[in-house]
Amino acid sequence: MDLGLKSKVALVTGAGSQKGFGKGIAEVLAGEGCDIAACDMDYKGAEQTASDIAKKGVRAIAVKADITNSAEVKEMVKKVLDEFGRIDILVNNAGGSAPPANFVDTTEELWARDLNLNLVGMTYVTRAVLPQMIERKSGAIISISSIASTMGTAGGTAYAAAKAGINNFTRSLAQELARDGISVNCIAPSLGNTAFYDEFPKEFADNFIGRAIEAGRYVTPEEIGNVVAFLASDSTNRIMGQCIHVTG
Amino acid sequence: MDLGLKDKVALITGAGSQIGFGKGMAMALAREGVDIIVCDMDLEGAEKTAEDVRATGRKAMAVKMDITNTDEVKQGVDSALKEFGKIDILINNAGVGTTPVPFVESTEKDWDINININLRGTMNVTRAVLPQMIERKTGRIISMSSTAGLSGMATGGVYGAAKAGVTLFTDALAKEVGQYNITVNCMAPGAGATNFHKASNFPQQAQDQFKNMAAAGMTTTPEELGTVAAFLSSDKGRKINGQCLRVAGLM
C-alpha cells in the first residue's frame, strides 16, 4: 500500500533516545520517504538519530528544544521551517513520567513537571507548527498518549491526567481543523522497552516492567511507527480526533 | 509500506453490492495480493465483485450467504476452506438497518432484522471461521460497527444497540483469542453513499440527503474503509487489538 508520504516533512519530538518510540517513528516515516526533523532536549541524541536516518537516503536534521519552554519551541520550529520550508507531519512524541508515587506523597513540583512535559509542551509545539499547515490546508498531527489516559494508573495520577488531556485536546483540535484538511489523532501505547522507565526505582522497573517485557507484553518503536505512518497518510484522513490503542 | 498480505485469503460478507463498503474492502485487499471469498445473499452481485477481483490477478470465489442462516454460513465457509485451504482474514461487513422510527413505533420485526443481521450474523460467521484460525494460530477479524453504535442516535436505537453489541463482542473476543495471534477489531464508519439506506427502507428524501452529503465529500467511501481494513489485516497493525476505529470524519 502506498501511503503517499514520499517527500513529506515530519517533525518528531523526543527523538533523541536511541531506543525510544520517537526514533522508531522517525525511522518508519523515513522508510516511507519522509524528510525528518529529529527534535530532543538532548541534542547529541537527536544528532545521532538524524545521522542514522540520513543513511536511508532522506534529508534529516537534528534540532534542540525543551518542549516545556515556549520560546525554545518557537525557535526550534522556525529552524525546521527555514531548513525544509514546511512541516507536513507533526509527531508529538516527547513525554515522560516522574517515578511512581501515590498522589498524597507527591509534590507540586512533580505534578507540574508531568503536566508540563506531557500536555503543555505538546500544545506549544502544535501551536508553533499549525499556522503553516492551516495556510497550506494540509497536515497531520499525531500525538503519543498512553493507555493510562483511559485506564488510569495508580502512582501516576498527574501523568495519566496529562495524557487524558492529550486525548481531548486531540478530539477538540480535530473538530476545529477538519475543514482545513488537517487530521489530528493520538496513539495510546502500552509500555515499551524504552528509556521511559530509566528514572524509576530499579525494583519497580524489574518487577513490573521487566516481567511484562519478558512476557512479550510491550510495544516496539517500529510498531508505533507503523501506526503513525498509517495515520499520517492522506488516505486515512477520515480518521479524525481518535485515540488508537496500540497495545496488543 | 509493504503490508505483507500477499497470498493471504480473506472472506468478506456483504460484498455483492457494486457501490458498497464490502466491495471497496475486497478490492483494496486484492490490490495487496489477497485472494477473496466474496459472500452475499445476492449471488449475482457477489459474482460481479469476484470478477473484478480476478481482474486484479487474484483468485476469487463467489458464495451465496445469508449470514442469519447458520447452515448456509457453515456450508459457505466449508466450501471456501475446501477451495482455498484457509481463511486468514474475516471481514464481517454485511449489515442493514430499518426505516428510522421512534422506538415506541418500532416493531419486533424491526428489532429482529437489526439484531439478527448486524449482531447475530456477525457472530454466526465468526463462529464458523474462527476454529481454523485458532488451530493455525493466526488470523484477523474485522467487523463493522457504526458511529450509531458509539453514541446514540434518535430513531436508530435498536440498530445502534446491535452495532454497540458488535463493538463489545469485538473487545471481548480480542481478549479471548489474542493468545492465538488473532486480532479482532471493528470499524465505525459514518454514512456512506452505498446501498445501505435503500436496503434499510429509508424514505427517499433521506436517501437523497446521503447522496448530497457524498457529493460534498462528507461520507465515508468504500476506498477509505479499504485502506483501514488492509492495515488492520496486516502484521503492521498487529498491536491494535479489540479496538473500534472511527472512520467517519466529522460525522
Image (tube, coloured by chain):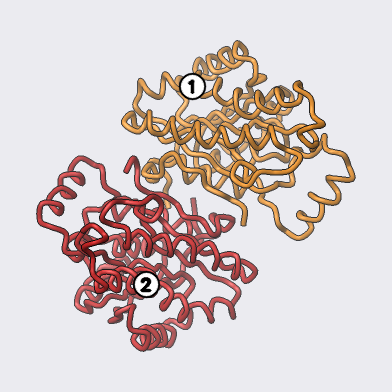
Chain colours: A orange, B red
Q: What residue sits 49% from the left and 57% below the top?
A: B3
Which chain's residue wears label 1? A
Q: Please identify the quarter of the rendering in which residue A201 is found.
A: top right
Query: On the image, numbered disc 1 is attached to which residue?
Result: A129
For this rendering, which residue is in front, A103 or A174? A103
Q: Residues within 10 Å of mark 2 (few under 14, many from 20)?
A: many
| Foreground residue among A94 and A105 | A105
Please give left or right for residue B251 compared with residue A60 in the image: left
Which amino acid lies under the numbered mark 2 shown in the image of this protein?
Ile
Q: Nearer the viewer, residue B97 or A19?
A: B97
- Give x and y (percent) for residue B119: 39, 70
Tell me the distance, in whole angstroms, between the alpha carbons under discs 1 and 2.
Answer: 43 Å
Q: Is residue A64 visible?
A: no
Mark whose residue sits in front, 1 or 2 = 1
**Picture quarter containing residue A99?**
top right
In the rendered structure, the answer to whether residue B64 lies left or right of residue A84 reads left
The reply to the same-chain question for discs 1 and 2 is no
Residue at x 53% of width, y 37% of height:
A167
Instruction: Assign the C terminus of chain A to one quadrant of the image.
Output: bottom right
Q: Is residue A15 above or below residue A190?
A: above
Q: Which secondary structure, mark 1? A: helix
Subunit under mark 2: B
Callout 2 secondary element: strand
Q: Position of residue A142 (x, y in %)?
A: 51, 36
- Residue farthest front in this picture: B104
Above or below A212: residue A20: above
Q: Amino acid at mark 1?
A: Val
Residue density around tag 1, few if under 14, some if 14–19, many if 20 or more, within 10 Å? many
Residue displayed at 66% across by 26% down:
A117
Disc marking residue B36 = 2
